[in-house]
Amino acid sequence: MLMSNPNQVIQPAINCAGREDHSQTETEAASAPIPPWKRMLDVTLIVMATPFLIPIGVIVFVFVKIVSPGPAFFRQQRVGHSRRRFMCLKFRTMKVNADTVVHQEHLKQLMTANQPTRKLDCAGDQRLIFGAMWLRAAGVDELPQLFNVLRGDMSLVGPRPCTPYEFELFPERYKQRCDAPPGLTGLWQVSGKNKTTFEEMIDLDLKYVREMSLGQDLKIVVLTVPAIMKLIWEMKLRPRFGMRAVEKAAKTHTELPGKAAGPVPGTVSARD
């Protein structure tokens, strides 16, 4: 609907659930509805996994509270299906009031440079709390997003939900990834997450949007656990074991008996 006043600002409406409804904002575009089978799959898998996930969630909650003062949960606005915005939940892995400018600059670099989409924590991020890299590598920091799935903001499988800042930098082609609901895992995550460029990540997201099906979602869910284990090995375990092997080799080399050095030709041994 056209506005009579071009300077009028569209205010988001509040729906019956008390959440902001951005469905009429200028940045939102129409997209295909979420297939019924996707919602049924999400709820079924969450119910089946709840007995295993609750203990893990409690352990992570207590761990975060012990190692870092402040709330255990972190809320951040993300852009979801049909470009609607929602509050995404996570376990907090950064110190309270951590600077976000560094992340924004890193994101800009990834979008413009043809290099793997490695996170800042791969090179060491001083903003992280103790043990955060392990939580992130295992993906358990995203367990609270299951509530987003149950609320309908997200799905178990789909493109990674981007921030509004990231979304504003996207060209229109990239924004088409919002034609599918965002997910905890996705085609990109099981296709070499830290080895793909930003452009390749977008291509995988758009491929998922085009070919979204029940069979593909089930396949991605099954492949997620091996993908997480491989990521933990590459990020945390392999460098550690590799360093130990180097240290062991260096220690062995220094302990090898060397030849007794004889007198240099043309010299005479010193006498008392």
Image (cartoon, helix red, strand yellow):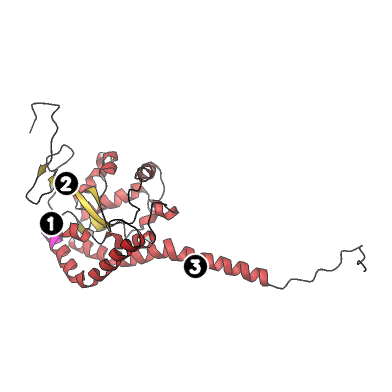
Label 3: element kind = helix
| Residue ID at (57%, 65%) | 246
Q: Start and end of the magenta stretch?
A: 30-39
Q: Is residue 139 visible?
A: no
Q: Which residue is mark 3?
A: 241
- Which residue is nearer to you in this view: 4 or 224? 4
- Which residue is nearer to you in this view: 135 or 224? 135
Residue type, label 3: Phe
Q: CA distance from mark 2 to mark 1?
A: 14 Å
| Residue ID at (32%, 65%) | 63
Residue type, label 2: Ser
Is 70 placed above or below 9 here? below
Q: Tell me whether the residue at label 2 lies in contact with that at label 1, contact meaning CB atoms closer than 8 angstroms.
A: no
Residue 199 drawn in magenta: no
Q: Is residue 82 visible?
A: yes
Instruction: From the viewer's perspective, tell me whether residue 67 is left or right of residue 88.
Output: right
